[in-house]
Amino acid sequence: MEAYLYEKLKDNKVACRLCNHCCEIKPDGYGRCKVRQNVGGTLQTLVYGKLIAINPDPIEKKPFYHFAPGTLAYSIATAGCNLRCDFCQNVEISQMPRATGKITGADYSPADVVTDALRTGCHSIAYTYTEPTIFFEFACDTAQLAHSKGLKNVFVSNGYMTTAAIDMIAPFLDAINVDLKAFDDDFYQANCGARLEPVKENLLHLKKRGVFVEVTTLLIPGLNDSTAEIKAAARFIADRLGPETPWHLSRFHPAYKRTDVSPTPANVLTQAYEIGKKAGLKYVYIGNLHGHDGENTYCANCGELIIERAGFFNVKTDKVQSGRCAYCGNPLPGVDM
């Protein structure tokens, strides 16, 4: 189907305005994502409804810790991505169009997704696994229908979309977890084929548009885990997005082109956690290190344990009542708490 957010240019060229690559595409050519093609001067999406991953997941797996904790999210993705991260954890599907020239997936309509989400008892639909921007048309149509049926919508994103894309989806997008891959532009260019500044700008724009924001940083030993860089990221989140913004610090496991890098040491994650706290962030979490106390949520006012987590499937939320700490009544920022 015809893509959203593009301009027609001379000589049947088109300019894609969906993400910050802003690809200019010649006739029969493709954008960097390899899932948008110029067909006779019209930009077409090649992945509409072609779902390659479909699964009801715990919302904590995304990860969201301040969005409807303890609920299920109907999680979907198509093949493709607009970045090319050397450390991608889902490379088989994210890089499929670029690596093989193929796009596979089962045919779904927005109504199919919404119906199945309701049937499986999901509270929300998560556009995840790969970058939701690259299947933006399907995500928009599905999100609008989902809202009309009482379902929430969440993105798990690299944050590289345009502000125009944010403005289009914002009325139907309840929350987003943005992967802040590093706080260094050289890292973004060398390891992701992208730039840092658009991600920072989009984080601020998402908050301005009223979308609840959580942030995740995968700490990769020797690449983005220096004390100075972690401090800079923590200050940006605390000062610009707000101290109530949840920050997930995730453990790296060797993947794709970074199989030569060891998993993140636990002490590095703990040090980063303390840096986040010292920067003024009220909710810092440690991910991919099961059993660590950094999985839990403590009240920022009284310090009591109010959401206890043991992995993704064992989440105790009884100490949060109507979005407030059951001990002191302090509000816990989030959605559907």
Image: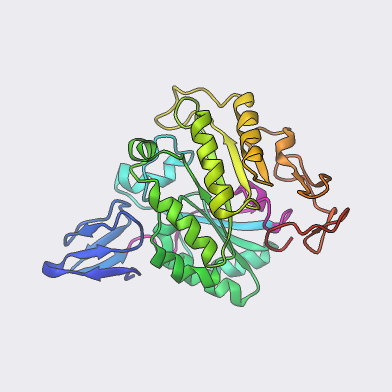
Q: Position of residue 21 (x, y in %)?
A: 30, 54
Q: Is residue 146 left or right of residue 324?
A: left
Q: Where is residue 133 in the image (x, y as percent from the top left)?
A: 42, 58
Residue 109 visible in the snapshot: no
Q: Is residue 46 magenta?
A: yes
Q: Is residue 161 magenta?
A: no
Vertically, is 117 above or below 270?
A: below
Residue at the image point whose x is 17% and y is 60% from the top: 26
Residue at the image point whose x is 39% and y is 67% from the top: 164
Give the quarter of the figure containing the C terminus.
bottom right
Residue at the image point whose x is 76% and y is 39% from the top: 310
Residue 197 visible in the snapshot: yes
Which colour style is shown? rainbow
Quadrant assignment, res 167? bottom left
Give the quarter of the figure containing the N terminus.
bottom left
Viewer-proximal residue among 158 and 242: 242
Viewer-proximal residue among 273 and 238: 238
Query: Which residue is the extreme one toward the bottom?
Result: 148
The segment highlighted magenta reads: 45-71
Q: Position of residue 93 (x, y in %)?
A: 43, 46
Q: Position of residue 81 (x, y in %)?
A: 39, 50
Residue at the image point whose x is 37% and y is 44% from the top: 95
